């Protein structure tokens, strides 16, 4: 079932350790099939280098396991909550990438002080409140605090990103860590100057509608 999506997720999961976004078995990627509404997600506690397409678990939006012999990620309920409340997205990523999670540890948003932040996220990357793992609470925090951003920090936890595809969500996760590192480095030298709202809107519009092929 959903063989192509499982194979895609296997490749995308390898991008997380490759880009320094996770360690050992932490983090996960999920994808929602737009035709069936079913969600494919990483199994709990499986190391990335051992992950195979058949290991992924297929679930309904209500959490019923449709296919898969392994337990789904402990973040599954939160992924499903986000999908139910953001029907336009088909990919979600969760990481504990160090620089972005450093901001989360302090409960601080990442300010929109770089063109790259305006381009990809359309403003500051918000930081939601703390929520326990295992239920829908994290997903609720993501939905309530995301605004127009495709990334949300979870206080004292990590990062959630999402997009129209799983690839877009992984790209956002890579971008979050990259800009978090740059902003952290800048803060070691002094205060950062945030971009004004008009510039942010113009940059995000250009990146969304003009940039690329």
Image: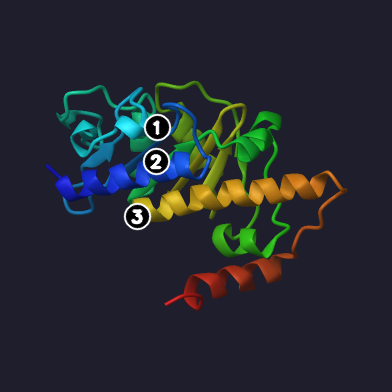
Say which of 120 and 189 sits in front: 189
Label located before the other in sequence (1 or 3): 1
* Mark in the foreground, 2 or 3: 3
Q: Are marks 2 and 1 in contact (CB under 8 Å)?
A: yes
Tag of residue 82: 2
The span from disc 2 to disc 3 (Cα, nearest Å) is 14 Å
Q: Is residue 50 left or right of residue 129?
A: left
Residue position for label 3: 165
For image coordinates 62% across by 44% down, the residue present is 126
Q: Are marks 2 and 3 in contact (CB under 8 Å)?
A: no
Q: Is residue 89 visible?
A: no
Residue position for label 1: 78
SS at mark 1?
Answer: helix
Mark 3 neighbour density, 10 Å: few (under 14) some (14–19) many (20 or more): some
Q: Where in the figure is residue 67, as x and y percent of width and height?
A: 14, 31
Determine whether 213 is above or below 195 in the image.
below
SS at mark 2?
Answer: helix
Label located before the other in sequence (2 or 3): 2
SS at mark 3?
Answer: loop
């Amino acid at each position: 079932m959903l063989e192509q999506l499982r194979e895609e997720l296997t490749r995308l999961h390898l991008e997380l350790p490759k880009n320094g976004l996770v360690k050992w078995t932490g983090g996960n990627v999920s994808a929602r099939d737009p035709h069936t509404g079913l969600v494919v997600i990483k199994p709990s506690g499986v190391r990335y280098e051992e992950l195979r397409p058949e290991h992924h678990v297929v679930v309904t939006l209500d959490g019923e396991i449709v296919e898969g012999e392994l337990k789904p990620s402990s973040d599954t309920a939160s992924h499903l909550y986000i999908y139910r409340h953001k029907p336009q997205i088909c990919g979600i990523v969760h990481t504990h990438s160090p620089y972005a999670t450093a901001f989360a540890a302090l409960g601080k948003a990442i300010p929109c002080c770089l063109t790259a932040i305006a381009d990809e996220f359309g403003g500051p990357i918000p930081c939601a409140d703390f929520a326990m793992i295992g239920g829908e609470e994290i997903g609720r925090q993501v939905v309530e605090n995301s605004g127009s951003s495709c990334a949300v920090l979870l206080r004292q936890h990590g990062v959630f990103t999402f997009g129209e595809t799983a690839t877009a969500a992984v790209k956002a996760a890579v971008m979050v860590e990259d800009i978090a590192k740059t902003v952290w480095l800048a803060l070691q030298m002094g205060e950062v100057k945030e971009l004004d709202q008009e510039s942010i809107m113009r940059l995000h519009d250009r990146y969304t509608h003009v940039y690329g092929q």
